[in-house]
Amino acid sequence: MSDVRARIRQQVDGNDVVLYMKGTKMMPQCGFSSRIAGVLNFIGVDFVDVNVLADEEIRQGIKEFSDWPTIPQLYVKGEFVGGCDIVTEMTLSGELDQLFETKGIPFDRAAADKIREANA
């Protein structure tokens, strides 16, 4: 497990935004992964997608790494942010915008505002 943990640590620390998901950012394989990838794509966040369906070690390892039982999982600047429900809540409350601003992650604020307007 330490080899998988090291691979995950390298992915998380080596990229500003990482989404562990089922499928890819262009072809999500589950609704929850699709929701987060869709938000990140819509607001223009450059992120690395890690398809857990393509690597069983990563699929199990990421759950232990984060101590979070479900996928997708979003990491920003090395920190675990959360899964679908948390990221959705953060998007709608504006907390995700604040996180990206604080961490220096470029995103389209107008697009983020459109998501909130559409869900008001």
Image: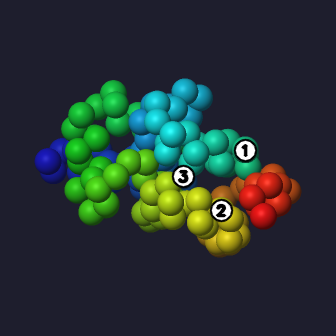
Residue 91 x/y as whole percent: 65, 62
89 or 2, nearer to the observer: 89
Kindly identify which residue carries mark 3: 17
Q: What amino acid type should be assigned to the residue bearing mark 1?
A: Phe
Quarter assignment of residue 96:
bottom right
Few, some or many residues within 10 Å of mark 1 (<14, 14–19, 20+): some
Few, some or many residues within 10 Å of mark 3 (<14, 14–19, 20+): many
* Residue at the image position 42 percent from the left and 36 percent from the top: 22
Name the side, left or right, on which 47 lies relative to 75: right
Ranked by sequence position, the earlier of labels 1 and 2 is 1
Distance from Cα at disc 3 to Cα at disc 2: 15 Å
* Residue at the image position 38 percent from the left and 48 percent from the top: 71
Kindly identify which residue carries mark 2: 91
The relative height of residue 33 versus residue 89 in the rendered view (above or below) is above
Front position among marks 3 and 1: 1
Identify the residue at the far front of this view: 120
Q: What amino acid type should be assigned to the residue bearing mark 2?
A: Thr
Distance from Cα at disc 1 to Cα at disc 2: 12 Å
